[in-house]
Every structure is written in structure tokens, then in C-alpha cells.
Image: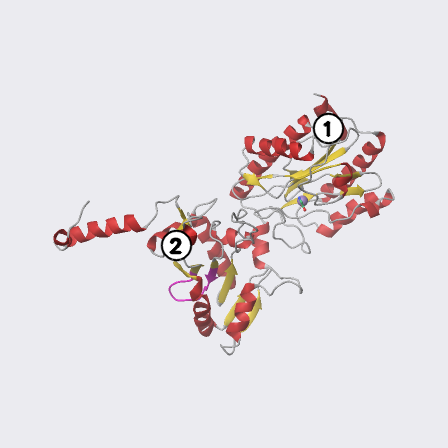
Amino acid sequence: MHFNRRTVLTGAAATAALAATVRAQVLPPSGFATPSGTFPFAADVYRERRARLMATLKDGVAVIHGAKRGATSGPVSPPFHQSGDFAWLTGIVDEPGAVLVLAPAERLYREFLLLPSRDVETERWDVERLPLGSQIEARTGIQRVRRTSGLDALVTGMAARSRTLHFMGPIASASSPVPAALDLYNRVMARVPGCTLKDQSALLPALRTVKEPRELDLMRRATAATKAGHLAAMKAVRPGMTERQLTAILETGFREGGGEGLSYDSIVATGRNAASLHYAHGNAEIGASDLVLIDAAAAVGTYACDVTRTFPASGKFTTQQRADYELVLAAQDAAARMLKAGVMHEDMTEAASAVFRRAGRIDDFTHGLGHFVGLDVHDAGDYAKPLPAGAVLTIEPGLYNQPLNQGIRIEDIYLVTATGAERLSTGIPRTVDEIEAFMAR
Ligand code: GLY
Ligand code: MN
């Protein structure tokens, strides 16, 4: 449509048409701009979660910072990974540097999303970002969207009305930087007398630990993709191949199995390399008598999985390898047998450790028993509380022995139920017999 000055001035219809044209020119179409919306669920899922959280907080103000973009060593950025707390509450996973502000007792607007200001030059390089307005509020489902430059004034005003500041965690160690929310609260408290700082750092982990059915659905899909990759690698491995070649086969299998990304950098370690727990990006040649350790998983809908398998490159365990492997498996089973709602995590660790202790091998088990899994591979959750039904966690004992040139870890992912646990990572050969039979095919 073409306008000249006269048609523009001829009345309401033309004015509305002009407004529509201007909007169409200013706003990039959906899919070409961030925030693209909420992911992986619809906006009302996140609105309901925020409402649940605010019902618990009752009053005051809670500030939750999203992740910032990671440091780059070159012109191309690594993939952006949103913080789990922020992703769980907003579904906004494509805007680094965002901040969520919740104020349950405010009269009209109780949730604010603050986004960094736009930079047209940067947007020429990475992605076009939406301007503020009703479209961004419709896409994100958040009542009010503002710029982060207004954060301090917004929170100061809310604090002056409510006098309560909620710290939502996570608790940082004394040697790491002061969390951004605490830093802001400290500055607000120096200006608004009579504010109370409340520790609410247990709330989000408690909410996030119990998975919703729709989250479990994505985690099952991530596990199916993970299985496809592990099977492809276990089938293809040959002595003489390199760790990197095997990684390529593994990750192709993830994609073919429906994986949308990696839960973390794949660990593919042969022989002695497997005794280094987070060995990654190696390119050693796989030896004929090596055990190969693969700790890797696909992600679906931003949900993680986490599985480790250890198997002989030749397809046959030696007597020593079989004995060690079966010890690790016995430790995993000892912990898994205890797993059900109400159990204490440290009691499971004790059960697994007891297996190694009885065999005189406790010093070769050099890490924790496992961890919660969800939006983050090492997900939010309180290990000091009884495990709730609906939690998903790994059990991953291992034995690491550099003089023997080997590291063995067996890691599976389990859903806690009222009466026991469901191993989600089924169908990936796990016992010595299952592995040897699968590799012989
Ligand atoms: N999958 C790596 C870890 O759990 O630390
Ligand atoms: Mn793990």
C-alpha cells in the first residue's frame, strides 16, 4: 500500500492502515527475532509456574537473573545455555542477560521481564531482537517487558513498598562472585531502610526436582536419542579407530535418534584416558585391549539426559576387566535397589561405597554417586532431603586406575517413584553378557 500525505490525513481507516504498515515494517516476522517465544512449552505453562512460586512467596520482590552470554575467544559465540531456574520460570532461552522480577503483592503488574537494550550494529551479526511493546508481551506471556537499564529503579520502588527481598539462590561458594541478585539487594538495602532479606534458595530446587509429565516426556525422548547414539558407537567401535572418529559416530546416532543437541560435551575416552573423569576432546587411538568409556547424551527440548557405558574395544572383556566391571555394576545395583521416594541420597552413596570397600577398592571410586538431571545435566535439587517421587537422577559409580590403564563408569538415569524407581535408560547393553552379545552381532 502506498500513502501520500493526503490519504494519510483522510481519516481513521487510513490511519489504522498506516499503523499496520508501520508495524509490519518495524517488527521482524516471528522466527526472525528474539525472544522467539517460550520454549519448549506454551507461555501459560510458565505463567502457572510463576503463579505457584508467587503464591508461596506471598509478598516482597524476587529477582531472578538469566544467564549472560559466555566468553568468546573469537568472532563466533558458543551456543547460549540459559540458566535452569530462569528457563524453568520463563521458557525464554534465546535472550542472554535477561532478568525476571516477581512481586506477588503489587497491585496491578506482578511480573516483569527485563531485557538488555537493543544494539542495531550487533543485530546485523547475530539476530534481530524485538522492540518493546505488546507483541513481545504476547510472545513471552509476561505482563510487562522492560529494559535491564530500569532494573535498579524498578526493584528499589518495589522494595520501598514491600520492604521484603527474596533471595532465590543458588547459594554461591565464598570464592565465587556475589550473585547478581544479592549484589542488587545489598545496594537496595543501603538506600531503603527497614528491608528484610529472606533466604528462599530452597524453593526453586524443590519445585524443579519434581518433574512434570511434559518434562518427563522430553527426557524420555532425550534418553531414546541417547540410546541410539550409544548403540551406534558400541556397534561401530574397532581397535585403531580414534576417539574423535567414535565421537562422530556417537553424535550422528544421537541426531538420527531424534536428539536436538548435546546435554554436555561428549566424553569418549579409551584406555588410561578413561581414568580422567571429565576427559573430553581427545583423539587417541583405541588400543586392541582397551576399555572404551563413553559418557555422553543427547538433549531434546532443552532437557538433558546422562548415560555412561564402558565396553571392550575388542568386544570381549578380559578376566580382570570383567571382574572390575562387575564390581561397578554391583555398586550401581546396590544403590538402585534402595532408590524410592523418601530415601536419603547419602544412604545410597553408602550402599555403593560398601561394595567397593568390601572389595578393597574404595580408593578407586573418586567421585560422587550421581546427581539430579533435568534442564541442567547437574540439575537443581537438595541432596540433604529425602528424595521425592518424580525426581530424576543418575547413579554412576566408577573405578579409576591409571596403572591398570583403565577407567570404568556405569551411569544410568532413574525416575523416582513412590514404591521404587524406573530406569529410564533401558535398552543400552549394561551387563557383561549383554555387551558381549551385542558387540558380537
Ligand atoms: N556426565 C558428566 C557428569 O555427570 O559429570
Ligand atoms: Mn552424570
Query: Is any part of residue 224 visible from this angle?
Result: no
- For disc 1, the marked residue is 240
Q: Is residue 337 left or right of residue 25?
A: right
Can you give x and y, in whole percent of width and height, for residue 377 in the image? 61, 46
**Which image quadrant for residue 32?**
top left
Could you classify mark 1 by the number of other residues whose Cα lies within 10 Å: few (under 14), some (14-19), or many (20 or more)? few
Can you give x and y, in whole percent of width and height, for residue 437 in the image? 73, 23
Front residue of this view, candidates 108 and 315 = 315
Q: Quadrant of the C terminus?
A: top right
Badge 2 or badge 1: first in the primary sequence? 2
Image quarter where ligand 2 lies = top right
Q: Is residue 347 left or right of residue 11?
A: right
What colouring style does the render use? secondary structure
Provide the secondary structure element on which disc 2 rests: helix
Can you give x and y, in whole percent of width and height, for residue 229 in the image? 62, 32
- The extreme top residue here reads 441
Q: Is residue 242 left or right of residue 68?
A: right
Q: Quadrant of the N terminus?
A: top left
Q: Is residue 88 left or right of residue 285?
A: left
Q: CA distance from mark 2 to mark 1?
A: 51 Å
* Magenta stretch: dominant secondary structure: loop
Provide the secondary structure element on which disc 1 rests: loop
Give the extent of the magenta segment: 100-111
Front residue of this view, candidates 258 and 162 = 258
- For disc 2, the marked residue is 120
**Ligand 1 lies under 8 Å from the Cβ of mark 2:** no
